[in-house]
Amino acid sequence: MPRRPLIAITATTEVIRGISRVRVNEAYTRSVEHAGMLPVIIAPMEDERRAAAIAASVDGVLLTGGEDVDPARYGAVARSETDTPHLARDRSEIALVVAAKTMAVPTLAICRGLQVLNVALSGTLIQDIPSERPTALAHSPGGPRDRRAHAVRASEGSRLAAALGASDLEVNSSHHQALDRVAPGIRVTATAPDGIVEGAESADDRWWMLGVQWHPEELTATAEAWDRALFEAFRRAAAAHAAIGTASESAPAATTTGSTALR
C-alpha cells in the first residue's frame, strides 16, 4: 500500500496562558488528513537555513493564514491598518517558499500563505483593502468562517480551475490584504468581482503551486465539492512528487570507473 504523502503545514506562535506556544488552526490538519495525507507542523524557525532540509523531507508544503507580512519585505512603509508582523515566521516561510520552488515541492498557499509566497518571489501587497481600494467588496465581513461571502471566477483552462472542478464558485472571506504587483513566475488565475486577486498558480509547469485567498480548509464539509477537490488535487500532486523521490531512491547506485565515482 503506498504511503500517504507527508505535508509540512506552517504554524505561528502565540502566548497562551502565559506561555509562548506553537499554534495552527485544526481545520488545516483535519483537511489534510481527510484528503489522505499526513500533516506535520512546522514552527517558525530560529535558523531559516533549515527550510531546505524541511522541503527535501516532505511531499508537499501548506502555507497557512495568519499575520500580515512585514511591509519592509516588499519595500513599503507599514500603514496604520497593518498588523504587527511576526518576523520569525516571515523569515521561515519565505525561506520555505524559495526551497519549495527550487525543489519543485507541491505547494498549496492559503490566504496569508499566498501573500507571503508572492512577497518571497518579489511581489508586493495591498496592505489594507478597505483604505486602499475603497470600492472593493467587503473581504473581511465577519460571521461564521464557513459562510460563503462572495463570488470568485477562476480562469478556464487554469490548473486552479481544474483542481476546483469549476470556474465559478462562492467562497468565504477573511482578509484585509491581497496581492498587488504579482511576482515574476506567478500567474493570476482567479479574481473576485471587484478585481481583487483570489487565486494564483505557478507559471512553471514543473512546480505544482496553487494559491487561494479564501479559506478552503473551513469549507471541506460543505455541500459544494470545490474545496474538497482542491485538497484532493494537492494530494495527487504530493503523491506524484513522493513517487518520483521513491523511484530515485530505489535506482541502482552509480558505477565507478577506476578511482573516479560518477556523482
Image: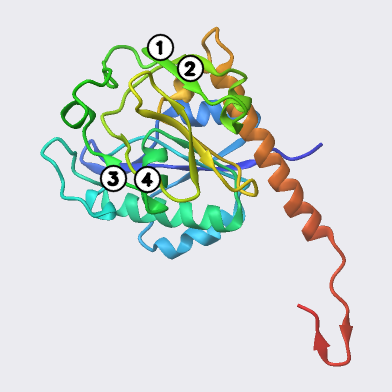
Which of the numbered marks, if any, corresponds to residue 193?
none
Residue type at the position of mark 2: Leu
Which residue of the protein is positioned furthest toward the top in this rendering? 223
CB of mark 2 within 8 Å of CB of mark 4? no
Precedes in sequence: disc 4 or disc 3: 3
Pick whichever of labels 1 and 4 is earlier in the sequence. 4
Question: For residue 69, which numbered disc appears in the image?
Answer: 3
**Number of marks in the rendered image:** 4
User: Mark 2 Cα within 10 Å, few/some/many (few <14, many 20+)?
Assistant: many
**Residue type, numbered disc 4:** Val
Q: Earlier in the sequence, mark 2 or mark 1?
A: 1
Q: Of marks 3 and 2, which one's residue comes earlier in the chain?
A: 3
Say what secondary structure mark 3 lies in: loop
Give neighbour class at mark 1: few <14, some 14-19, many 20+ (Cα, 10 Å). some
Q: Which amino acid is tagged 1?
A: Arg
As drawn, is 46 to the left or to the right of 97?
Answer: left
Dot 1 falls on a residue whose secondary structure is loop
Separation of residues labelled 2 and 4 (CA atoms): 22 Å
Answer yes or no: is residue 34 visible: no
Identify the mark at residue 116; answer none if there is no mark: 4
**Amino acid carrying mark 3 in the image:** Val
| In the foreground, 177 or 190 | 190
Dots 3 and 2: beta carbons under 8 Å? no
Q: Is residue 60 left or right of residue 261?
A: left
Q: CA distance from mark 2 to mark 1?
A: 9 Å
Marks 4 and 3 sit apart, C-alpha to C-alpha, by: 6 Å
Residue position marked by numbered label 2 in the rendering: 219
N-term mark: 3 or 1: 3
Q: Position of residue 48 (x, y in %)?
A: 40, 61
Q: CA distance from mark 3 to mark 2?
A: 25 Å
